Image (cartoon, rainbow, N blue to C red):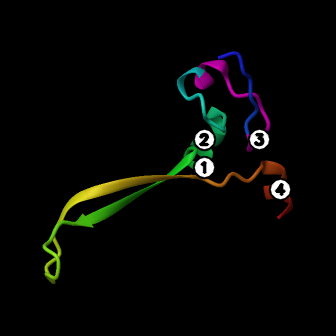
Amino acid sequence: MDEERDCERCGKPIPRRRLEVLPFTRLCIECSEAIGGDFKTFVIPENTGKPGSLKKNYGSWQVKRKLRKITPLEKKATD
């Protein structure tokens, strides 16, 4: 991957090795650690009970990931 990108939060260049491992990342290492990464992760219990039953059987879990909204540091400082 020859593409070089800047971090969407601080504007510093994202290290080449990070882009090789995570080609779609939008954050440098420092910003990723500060805000918790590119994604928010949600764990949702799935009801495996019979339809119409009032008993809740949570036999499995579903994991969903949603892209995190990234606020650049310049805008954050002026708020």
Query: Is 2 displayed left or right of 54 in the figure?
Result: right
Say few, some or many: other residues with alpha carbon within 10 Å of mark 4 (under 14 / 14 to 19 / 20 or more).
Answer: few
Amino acid type, label 2: Ser
Residue in view at x 26 percent, y 64 percent: 46
Q: Which residue is mark 1?
A: 35
| Mark carried by residue 10 | 3
Residue in view at x 53 percent, y 24 percent: 21
Say few, some or many: other residues with alpha carbon within 10 Å of mark 1 (under 14 / 14 to 19 / 20 or more).
Answer: some
Give the mark, 2 or 3, whose residue is nearer the N terminus: 3
Q: Main secondary structure of the magenta part?
A: loop
Query: Is 40 displayed left or right of 34 in the figure?
Result: left
Amino acid type, label 3: Cys
- Cα–Cα span, label 3 and label 1: 12 Å
| Mark carried by residue 7 | none
Q: Which residue is mark 4?
A: 75
- Cα–Cα span, label 3 and label 4: 10 Å
- Cα–Cα span, label 1 and label 2: 6 Å
Decide whether residue 27 is among the magenta residues. Answer: no
